[in-house]
Amino acid sequence: MMNDELRMREAAHTDIPVLANHRRWMFEEMAVLRGEPYGPTALEAMTIEYRRWLEERLGGDIRGWVIESGNQIVASGAVFVYDLLPRPGDWTGRTALLHSMYTDPAYRRRRLAKQIVLKAIEFCQASGFRGLRLHASDAGRLVYESLGFAPTTEMWLSFEQVA
């Protein structure tokens, strides 16, 4: 496995089932580490909705990248482009959010996530974005900090618990 030839490419619509599974596994792993696992109903509902969401947006306001070993996708991540309110220093409101970063456990510690993040940064800079947002897991925080990401003041108020 360590001698695998790995290659990165832009995600295609045929990759959507894998991308949705990667997002599900990302949430499962984060929840286990926090000691607050999601129920299977919530995870399945999210996976189904994320597939639908990608079908509508991939290649448009969602750009994704995968890293393959042979014909197997072993890592993935995406950028979602959306609008926020204009603010000082960025009156366009156009915002890029890095999301759904996942690497197969057998391929971790090989800088695959970092390669995807660098590709996302390249895309955002070429597209004229003022920056790139993300919500970091504890496991991914060091990767992002090593690339210059800094914590923000964002907070969250939840109105309901997910089963």
Image (cartoon, rainbow, N blue to C red):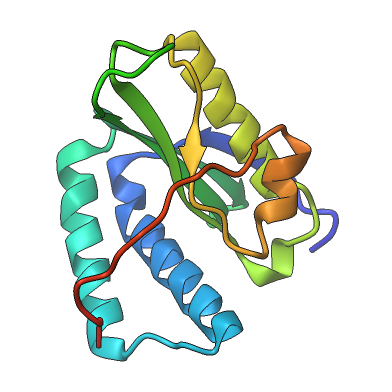
In the displayed structure, would residue 46 be above or below residue 15? Answer: below
The image quadrant that residue 115 belongs to is: top right
In the displayed structure, would residue 59 be above or below residue 55? Answer: above
Residue at the extreme right of the image, as rendered: 3
Quick check: can you spot residue 60?
yes
Q: Residue at x 27, y 69 (%)?
A: 158
x and y percentages locating residue 72 in the rendered image: 54, 58
Front-most of 97 and 84?
84
x and y percentages locating residue 36 in the rendered image: 46, 87
Q: Residue at x 72, y 62 (%)?
A: 107
The quadrant of the rendering that contains the C terminus is: bottom left
The quadrant of the rendering that contains the N terminus is: bottom right
Q: Is residue 76 left or right of residue 143?
A: left
Q: Residue at x 71, y 70 (%)?
A: 106
Q: Residue at x 24, y 69 (%)?
A: 46
x and y percentages locating residue 79 in the rendered image: 41, 36
The image quadrant that residue 48 belongs to is: bottom left
In the displayed structure, would residue 142 be above or below residue 79? Answer: below
Front-most of 105 and 13?
105
Quick check: can you spot residue 6?
no
x and y percentages locating residue 83 in the rendered image: 23, 27
Count how many numbered circles sit on residues in the image. Answer: 0
Q: Is residue 147 left or right of residue 92?
A: right
Q: Is residue 23 left or right of residue 32?
A: left
